[in-house]
Amino acid sequence: MTGTRERILDATAELFRIRGYCATGMKQVVARAEAPFGSVYHFFPGGKEQLAAESIERAGRHYHDLVLAVFDAEPDVIAGTRAVFDGAGEVLRTSGYADACPIATVALEVASTSEPLRHASDRVFESWLASLRARLVAAGVDAATARSVAISVVALLEGAFLLSRTARTTEAMAATGDAAVALVEAALAG
Amino acid sequence: MTGTRERILDATAELFRIRGYCATGMKQVVARAEAPFGSVYHFFPGGKEQLAAESIERAGRHYHDLVLAVFDAEPDVIAGTRAVFDGAGEVLRTSGYADACPIATVALEVASTSEPLRHASDRVFESWLASLRARLVAAGVDAATARSVAISVVALLEGAFLLSRTARTTEAMAATGDAAVALVEAALAG
């Protein structure tokens, strides 16, 4: 069984993804983690903000690895891009539109109110951008264009999570998947 | 001076934009609105959820009108698209990265927990998509493509708000502005 500390971090990440930072209480976290109440302050003496910062980084790393595994299973960056958007749409549908970006809600909630959590979110997004950019560069896209396209692909995915969760349809994920593929194709054609 | 009811709605919208739904308390709302505490329950007997639903729709309408005024001041849909992203970047910079989408934070917070607020958010996004789609159709884009491009342009803008607020730079707004213009150009050429 996973250690208590990891269970607390995973429970936090799950609640953040569904309802965000503010609406996630420490009592809900320990209940979901099946951990004694005191353990959260034992492992995270800095309280909710410390727990949140570590949870954002852990969830961001997990999502990075998951998405890149989907991307890298395809023969090229065009098919990889398509697979990520198709996969995100499928996960939205099968999770009742709950399972989307693990950190977007929290990132928007805290951007103007918590510098530690804003920095944690920024590090996550930068890690995603760096990995996507590296794959575009390896496929022959010049470095500046690769950075710009990586930003737009991540923005399309994040915008589609917002629109799809709000509408409870995958229409936005399908439309943005087409747009992301078109941007990657144009960058390759250079 | 604006009526108390409108001041309460505007104060709510401002707090939602900066910190979201959950972190916005009724006491902060009445303080910012310079309204007596009881007035919020007088005007919104349904409490915070009713206030939020009306605030989302009002803020969404204001932002719709503001963005479309920027768009329509340009000679064509390409220049209009560019102007919206440039303007959004400028507002982010001058507001200390606080002034972004008025409803995205709330929409993500409530998507899985409040059907009335999810519906209110959905109506706002649909109104933005309908107006952008109509402009693309008037410029000669076929109806299905126009809907798809409108979704991608709004997704790019929303994703850029998230990345720009988190990084406290306008790099993402500039990159997505280029991508949005490229998508509109391709649709016009198509």
Image: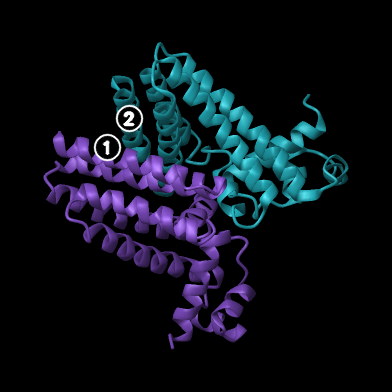
Chain colours: A cyan, B purple
For this orientation, the residue located farthest to the top is: A75
- Residue on which the image places disc 1: B182
* Distance of label 2 from label 1 (alpha carbons): 8 Å
Point 53% across, 63% down: residue: B16
Residue B27 x/y as whole percent: 64, 75
Q: Chain of mark 2?
A: A
Q: Is residue B9 above or below residue A12?
A: below
Residue A25 x/y as whole percent: 72, 52
Which numbered disc covers residue A64?
A: none
| Amino acid type for the residue under numbered disc 2 | Leu
Disc 2 + disc 1, Cβ < 8 Å: yes
| Amino acid type for the residue under numbered disc 1 | Ala
Residue B12 x/y as whole percent: 52, 70
Q: Is residue A73 above or below residue B42?
A: above
Q: Quarter holding the C terminus of chain A?
A: top left
- Residue on which the image places disc 2: A183
Drawn side of residue B177 relative to residue B136, left or right: right
Q: Chain of mark 1?
A: B
Point 44% across, 88% down: residue: B1
